[in-house]
Image: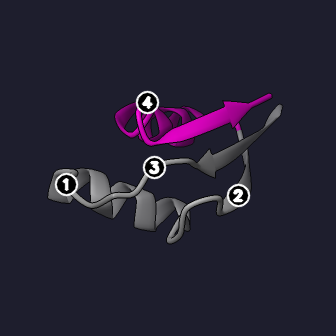
Amino acid sequence: MAKIKVTQLKSKIGSTERQKRTLTALGLTKINATKEFEATPQILGMVEKVKHLVSVEK
C-alpha cells in the first residue's frame, strides 16, 4: 500500500470531542507533529474527519 504523511497544522482547541479523539488516535498530540501511515481506508477516513486541522502528503 501507499504511505501518507500526516502533519498537524492547527490546534485541537475548539474542536469537537470526536475530532480531538481522532487526532489522539492518529498519534498527533502537538502542532507540527508528523506521522507516517499506510493509506488504508480506516486511516483515510480518520484523516477526512480532521482534514481542516492537518495536511497530508503522499
Sequence-first tag of 2 and 3: 3
Residue 56 falls within the magenta-colored stretch: yes
For residue 57, which quarter of the picture? top right
How many neighbours does mark 3 have within 10 angstroms: few (below 14), some (14-19), or many (20 or more)? Answer: few
For residue 43, which quarter of the picture? top right
Residues shaded magenta: 39-58
- Disc 4 is placed on an element classified as helix
For residue 21, which quarter of the picture? bottom left
The C terminus: image quadrant? top right
Q: Is residue 10 left or right of residue 56?
A: left
**What numbered label is drawn on residue 10?**
3
How many neighbours does mark 4 have within 10 angstroms: few (below 14), some (14-19), or many (20 or more)? Answer: few
Sequence-first tag of 4 and 1: 1
Q: Amino acid at mark 4?
A: Glu
Q: Is residue 49 left or right of residue 34?
A: left
Looking at the image, which residue is at 35% across and 36% down? 49
Alpha carbon separation for disc pair 3 and 1: 10 Å
Sequence-first tag of 3 and 4: 3
In the displayed structure, would residue 31 be above or below residue 38? Answer: below
Q: Amino acid at mark 2?
A: Thr
Q: Is residue 1 visible?
A: no
**What numbered label is drawn on residue 14?**
1
Alpha carbon separation for disc pair 2 and 1: 21 Å
Q: Amino acid at mark 1?
A: Gly
